[in-house]
Amino acid sequence: MRRCVIVSSLLETMMFSSSDFQVTGEVKLKADEVKLNEKQIRLLDYRCASWLQGNFSREVLNHYSITISNFPFKGCLTLTFFVLHTFICSNFICFIGRESPSIAGIINPGSEGFQKLFFGQEEIAIPVHSSIEAACSAHPTADVFINLHHFGGHAAASSMSALKQPTIRVVAIIAEGVPESDAKQLIAYARANNKVIIGPATVGGIQAGAFKIGDTAGTLDNIIHCKLYRPGSIGFVSKSGGMSNELYNTIARVTDGIYEGIAIGGDVFPGSTLSDHVLRFNNIPQTNILMSSMSQNDGCSRELGGRDEYSLVEALKEGKVHKPVVAWVSGTCARLFKSEVQFGHAGAKSGGELESAQAKNQALREAGAVVPTSYEDLESAIKETFEKLIEEGKITPVSEVTPPQIPEDLNIAIKSGKVRAPTHIICTISDERGEEPSYAGVPMSTIVEEGYGVGDVLSLLWFKRSLPRYCTQFIEICIMLCADHGPCVSGAHNTIVTARAGKDLISSLVSGLLTIGPRFGGAIDDAARYFKDAYDRGLTPYEFVEGMKRRVSVCQGLDTGSRAETTETRECSFCRNMRTLIFLP
């Protein structure tokens, strides 16, 4: 199965919490590592430039040792995919509407080349690499690996290989069902090497107008509807991908939209936690580069089960989060059940009172988070908190911009009935327009159910009708007698070449006959000789096959491999038929 790695230059702003950096008391920056003049900054993606001039001039620089010499300063995000999903890849590079594609390369184990993808109105060629190492070597600025493999065990192995690459800092694992032991090893390695894992079992994440992972936020229409084509003011993190997509819409209705949204994944052991991302959102400062002065209003949505919310509670109590937090833990209906219940994900399982939704919501409320009394009130809570920040002058809503025009895929447009396309091929042999192909009006299911033979099918294809059984049997006998039994079709090829060269029929026929030998056509002749000899000597099929195995390496006309290895299979069906037709009087 094909796999992909997506690598981003901008996810430095997205994928690291405060715990991911080593505290040194000062930031080490070399003057020759970052040299940006006004013209260069204008050429950069404005979010990348804003993060550099914002974060590196504020308090983050006073607390963390950050080296930015390897930051890929390009005018677009660069990605590398592992597992090719053409539709997802096309949406990935098109939803932003930027001038250059955001995918650096695709990894397809065992093969190399190029993959065509639509970028706007044009098709572009994305390089395909045979290994993770080759892709990382070819694209050193790609630092985010998105693993779209569907099988947990394979996804864990390839993700570990990606984490061991020095250029990869962030790995997103879409697959669910990653073995818990493998997940623990991935998390331990990532934390030891200051790398970040999103997932497993995640639908991905999105930085509005800049970057998205996998199939996050759905179709392009939904991305535009949820205002995800440009950054807003809300930082959102959830365990559930479905809940993320639903709340992107909710947030867009009552605020200016999200700045970034992450689904950490539904497995028991997520690579990064809710508190990691909330603390990270808290450290993203106000900046004028993103159209207006902005402050992130951190939204957090979760399910019952696990105790990750309590680390967020501690962060709130200790004053590590100084921005408003709107939180809601789903699953309050669990108390209505008499026994322990699990909602959706492996991690959404209540194991005690402290892991209940009510206990978590109450703890978050007491710690200072805005927690509604029910999910129905969550939209109002978000709206009130957002409007309060506006009244206090702490936030200015983002000005609306015209979303980029993304061409609709032709196949999707045809299915939806928006366009019609003329046919290019007229086929009188088969009809493939319906749910199943049909031959001369006979559906494929009928052909299978009624046991049509080769002759019956050929009568439908060639003669456009069902011929009598004796006719179809004659066709099948002709095929059996005339079929090429050798690996080298030199006779047929030579006859065709000679005929095309303008020679007469006899010359063409002879040119083919002269190449008949042990490797072409001769198998039938040799098999006839062997059968005749065995019949004259009165051998049984078993004696015949065993004798042939001792005399020659290949028994012409028979398969003497695995079928002759055991007592039960030595007398194969072909031998039994031959005994009836030849050996028995």
Image (tube, rainbow, N blue to C red):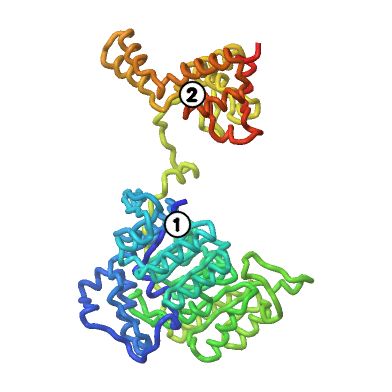
Tag of residue 220: 1
Res. 359 in view:
yes
Question: Quick check: marks 1 and 2 in contact, CB under 8 Å?
Answer: no
> Looking at this view, is 245 or 527 the one in front?
527
Residue 240 appears in which quarter of the rendering?
bottom right
As displayed, is residue 518 above or below residue 290? Answer: above
As displayed, is residue 345 above or below residue 467? Answer: below
> Looking at this view, is 531 or 105 the one in front?
531
Residue 551 spot, x, y in % from top left: 49, 26
Give the residue displayed 65% in from the left and 33% down from the top: 567
Residue carrying label 2: 556
> Looking at this view, is 170 or 544 the one in front?
544
Give the residue displayed 45% in from the left and 73% down from the top: 196
Give the residue displayed 65% in from the left and 29% down from the top: 449
Give the residue displayed 74% in from the left and 71% down from the top: 340
Mark 2 lies on a secondary structure that is loop
Which quarter of the figure is the C terminus placed in? top right
Amino acid identity at mark 2: Gln
Mark 1 lies on a secondary structure that is helix
* Marks 1 and 2, the one that precedes in the sequence: 1
Residue 156 spot, x, y in % from top left: 50, 63
Amino acid identity at mark 1: Leu
Residue 67 spot, x, y in % from top left: 31, 80
Label 2: few (<14), some (14–19) or many (≥20) C-alpha neighbours in 10 Å: many
